[in-house]
Image: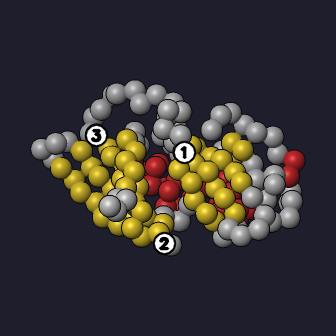
Amino acid sequence: MKYLHTMIRVRDLDATLAFFCAGLGLREVRRKENAAGKFTLVFLAAPESPDAEIELTLNWGSTEDYGCARNFGHLAFRVDDIYATCAQLSSIGVTINRPPRDGHMAFVRSPDLISVELLQKGDSLPAQEPWASMPNIGVW
């Protein structure tokens, strides 16, 4: 058996691509537009995990309420520098819901409310401001 991908329905493909690509550094692997089915599929992968993909599905013209996405759980990514990753996400307008106060773990949410856990590669980094004193914001 081989793991293929996790699918996320998205409301705004451009905003979601900015979050995962500009914010987290994932890369678009392939894209499929299906005019008959009225959907677009975009597959993303992390540079160090090219076989584990995220499939973004945009259903054209859909007004379906996807809810708050708390039933899904979360995606998790190991990052080289959790502070730099959180700073990059903040710079594109992403709220850091659970800041990396411990130098090891943070949570953010995608534009489609998917919870994303960020974990520091290796040992926790020393506590650093502004992260060390930031409160939690919202839910993740």
Q: Measured along the vertical axis of the image, is residue 90 above or below residue 97?
A: below
Q: What residue is pinned by disc 2? A: 47
Residue drawn at point x = 53 percent, y = 50 percent: 75
Q: Amino acid at mark 3?
A: Asn
Q: Measured along the vertical axis of the image, is residue 139 above or below residue 123?
A: above
Instruction: State the SS at label 1.
Output: strand
Residue drawn at point x = 76 percent, y = 53 percent: 100
Is residue 6 shown left or right of residue 21? left
Q: Quadrant of residue 44?
A: bottom left
Count the numbered circles shown: 3
State the separation of the CA atoms marked 1 and 2.
Answer: 19 Å
Q: Earlier in the sequence, mark 1 or mark 2?
A: 2
Tag of residue 74:
1
Q: Residue furthest left?
A: 36
State the separation of the CA atoms marked 1 and 3.
Answer: 22 Å
Q: What residue is pinned by disc 3? A: 59
State the separation of the CA atoms marked 3 and 2.
Answer: 27 Å
